[in-house]
Image: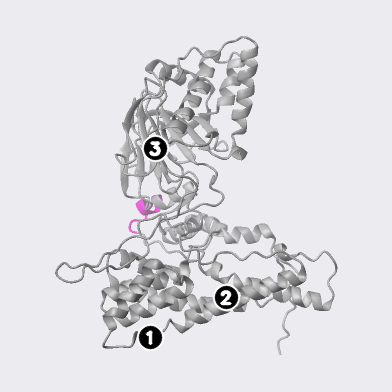
Amino acid sequence: TQIPSAASRHRAAEEVRADFQRRVPYSYLQRAYIQLNKLEEAANAAHTFFMANPEHMEIQQDIENYKTTAGKVSLIDWEAKQHMEDYSAGVRHYDKEEYELAIDFLERALEGYYSEDEDCQIMCEGPQRFEEHEYLEYKAGLYEAIADHYMQVLACKHDCVRELATRSGRISPIENFLPLHYDYLQFAYYRVGDYIKALECAKSYLLFHPDDEDVLENAGYYEGLLEGTVDPGSIKPRKEAKMLLRRHKLESHLLQVAAAGLGYTYTEPNYWNRYGARQDEHSVPSSISSEPEDGPRLSLAKKPMPKPDRELKEGGPLLYSDVKFVYNSQQLNGTQRVLLDNVISEEQCRELHRVASGIMLAGDGYRGKTSPHTPNERFEGATVLKALKYGYEGRVPLKSARLFYDISEKARRIVESYFMLNSTLYFSYTHLVCRTALSGQQERRNDLSHPIHADNCLLDPEANECWKEPPAYTFRDYSALLYMNADFEGGEFIFTEMDAKTVTASIKPKCGRMISFSSGGENPHGVKAVTKGQRCAVALWFTLDPLYRELERIQADEVIAMLDQEHLGPSEMNINPKDEL
C-alpha cells in the first residue's frame, strides 16, 4: 500500500500568488515556445497573458507580430472561464439581434455559473488565512478559533458572487453580472415569441432588483400577452436564482451578527449594483412599450448610464484671443473632446523644438526603454523640471526652458476653462515627447506608434470594458496633447470605440494644434505609425484630486519662484488671458 506523503510545509509567497493571478508565467511560456519555434503555442500563451494584462503594450505588439509571421492564428485563452465566454458570446449575438443563439449561450452561461458557484463554495471549506480577518488581538481559545475559522469560510463563500463575476486576472467584477443574464434573456425570449420564459426571466431579475421600473413594465406587458392562455401567477422566478439569493442574504446576516459578536467591522458590498461601470453601447434591455402603428411597436431603449461624479460640461471660454476653436465633442464623434488651433505660434514651436533637442533622453519616462511602444520608432522625452534645471545651469537658453513651463500652464488653463470645471485642475504629469521613425524598419509595418488605450483605466476590448484599477493611473481626469510640428509622415492621433478597432475621429498634428479630452474609457485613443521623420508634442495629464499633483511640477514652481526672486524675469511669451468671450 502506498503511504500518502505528508503535506508540504512550504507555502507559495504572496508575490508568487500575485504573479499567477496576473498570469505572469504565460509571459515566460511564450518566450520558451518561441525558442522551440512553436509559434501557435507562443501566440496562445501571449494571448492568455494579454487577457489579464491588456495594458501590456509589448505583448500586444508580439501578438500582432504572430498574426503576421504565423499566418491565420486562432488565439485561445487557456485560462478562460467558460461561463464568462458563454456570457460574452450571448451578449454578442444579442447585439446582432440573433436572439435564438443569444438564448443558447446565455442559458449555457447560467448553467456554468451555478456549477462554478458550487465549486467555489467547496473550495472555501479548506484552511483559511485571510489578512483582513486577523482582527483578534489576543490568542484565541478553542471556541473563538472555531468561530473565527467559520466566519472566514463564510466570508469566502459570500464573496463567490464577486469571484464568479470577475474575469481572470482582473480585480474588478462585472457589475450586476448574474442579474444581467436574466435581463438579457427576458427580452430575447420575448423576441422569439416565448412569453412564458420571458416572464419567468423577468421575475427572476426582479428578485435582485424588485424596484426596476423598466423590467416591472416588461413583466406587466408579458402578463398581458398571456392573459386567457396561462395564469401569469403560476409562472414563478427560477428556483436556482431564488435559492442563491436566499443563501446570499442569510450569509450576509450571519456575517453581520458575527461582526458584532467578535468585535470587528463588516461592511456588506453592493454585489448587485444595477448601474455599475458599463460604458459601452451594449446596454441592458429596457422597457417595452406598445404604440398603435399597424399593431404593437416594440422599442429597445437603453438603461440610464451611471451618473458621473460631476456634471459634464463643455464650451467654456478659451481665455486667449489667438486660440482658435476647431471641433467639439459632437463633431469629433465622442464625449468631452475638443480640438483647438493656434495654442502656440510657429516661432514658439521652433523654440520648443530646439529645447527638446537639447534636453531629451531616449526612453525618458519609460524606465530607459528607447522603444516602449513599438520597436520601429525611437522614443525620447523630458519633463518641465529637467528643462528648467538645464536652463538654470546654462545648458539650454533659460528663456526657452521657461517657455515649456509657461505653455503647459496655458494649456491647463484652457482645458479647465473650456470644460467648465468647478474645481481646480492640477497637473498629474507633463512630458515633452518625440517619436522618430527608424530607417530600414518601415516596410510592411502594420503596428501603431502608440497602441489604443485609455488614460485612467485598463482597456479590455474583448469585454468592451475599461477597468479603473491599478496599474492604470486612475486619478487622471483630463488629457491634452499640444503638437509642435507637421514635417513627418503618419503619426495621426485617433479616437476609437471601446473595441479598439472602430475609428471615430482622426487628427493630423501640426504646430499649435491641441486635442484635449476626458481620460476615461469613453475616450480610447492611440497614435498611427510614424513612418518618416520625427513627431514631437507636449503631452499633459491632469487631475482634479490635489493628492495626485505632479511632484516635479511643484518643484518646478519652486524653481520659477526662485528665478523670479533673482530678477531673472518671466518668459517674454505673451500668454496674458483676454477678457472672457
Residue indicated by mark 3 = 314
Which mark is nearer the camera, 3 or 1?
Answer: 1
Please give the name of the residue rendered at 43% of the width and 32% of the height, measured from the top-left corner: 481
Circle 2 is placed at which residue position?
A: 248
Residue placed under numbered mark 1 in the picture: 233
Task: Provide the residue span drawn in magenta.
Answer: 65-72
Mark 2 or mark 3: whose residue is earlier in sequence: 2
Q: Position of residue 371 (x, y in %)?
A: 48, 38
x and y percentages locating residue 254 in the rendered image = 66, 76
Q: Nearer the viewer, residue 312 or 140?
A: 312
Placement of 261 over or under 233, stated as above or below: above
Q: Are marks 3 and 1 in contact (CB under 8 Å)?
A: no
Three-letter code, disc 2: His
The secondary structure type at the circle numbered 2 is: helix
Is most of the magenta stretch helix, strand or loop? helix
Drawn side of residue 59 relative to residue 532, left or right: right
State which quarter of the image contains the N terminus: bottom right
How many numbered marks are there?
3
Q: Quadrant of residue 529?
A: top left
Q: Is residue 137 above or below residue 345?
A: below
Element on which disc 1 rests: helix
